[in-house]
Amino acid sequence: MAESSRITARDGVRADARRNRERVLVAARAVFAEHGIDAPMATVARRAGVGVATLYRHFPTRDALVRGAFAQQMETCARALTEALAAPDPWQGFQQLVETVCALQREERGFPAAFVAAFPESTSEHAQSRQRAERDFTTLVRRAQASGALRADFHPSDLAVVLLAHCGLVTALPDDGAASRRLVAYLLQSFRTDPANKPLPPPTALTLRSLPIATDSPQGQRPPRA
């Protein structure tokens, strides 16, 4: 008689294999939150209670594991950007996008680095995805500025500054949602057009791909590899 663990679903994946995959994803999110996305794959396997070979069977590369662990969050970000561009009020679209991304940072501490690494340029398809996201965000910024709501000297690279600042706060205060929401509100308020606002200094050279949270652990040190 076949064991229940060997029963396959319609997609042909065995139930036990599906459970192992889910355990790996849960463990990966926890390990990435604690040690950053450069944490050893073996550490993820141990946390999941599976062998390293099992982990690699499901996720042959680190990039595949990061994408799998935060697939839902990535989809939320992509949907938020699409909805922001479609919003009748460009400022409301801009505001909701920033709030959504920061909320995801708060809910999943491993997400900031995963978000930055979401579109690695290892293939032309991934490079095009990154370029499209950056182009769409720039379009959103220009629309909000043209509406008169977003200050004229806001630069698309300022999103990287927002993510880095907010990441520092949620790393130091992971359970303080009020502090997170207050910081985001302060930042959004500062981005609004106001005749009393003085011009900003020149924009940073930061880009999403160059943020230090892309490879460093939350403590600012690169963890050893397996």
Image: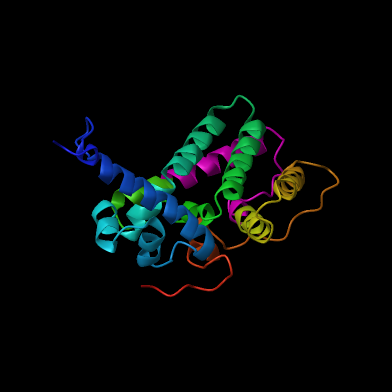
In the image, residue 167 sits, relative to residue 134, either above or below, namely: below
Q: Is residue 147 left or right of residue 224?
A: right
Dominant SS type (magenta):
helix
Residue span colored magenta: 132-160
Q: Is residue 100 left or right of residue 55?
A: right
Is 78 one of the magenta-colored residues?
A: no
Query: Which one is in front, 48 or 168?
Result: 48
Indicate the position of residue 80 as horizontal and vertical percent values.
53, 35
Q: Quadrant of residue 96?
A: top right
Residue at the spot x=60%, y=51% of the render? Answer: 159
Q: Is residue 154 magenta?
A: yes
| Residue 211: image location, x then y, percent | 54, 62
The quarter of the image holding the C terminus is: bottom left
Q: Which residue is outermost to the left?
A: 1
Question: With respect to residue 89, does 173 lie above or below?
Answer: below
Residue 94, percent across and down? 62, 37
- Compare residues 11 and 134 and report the one nearer the observer: 11
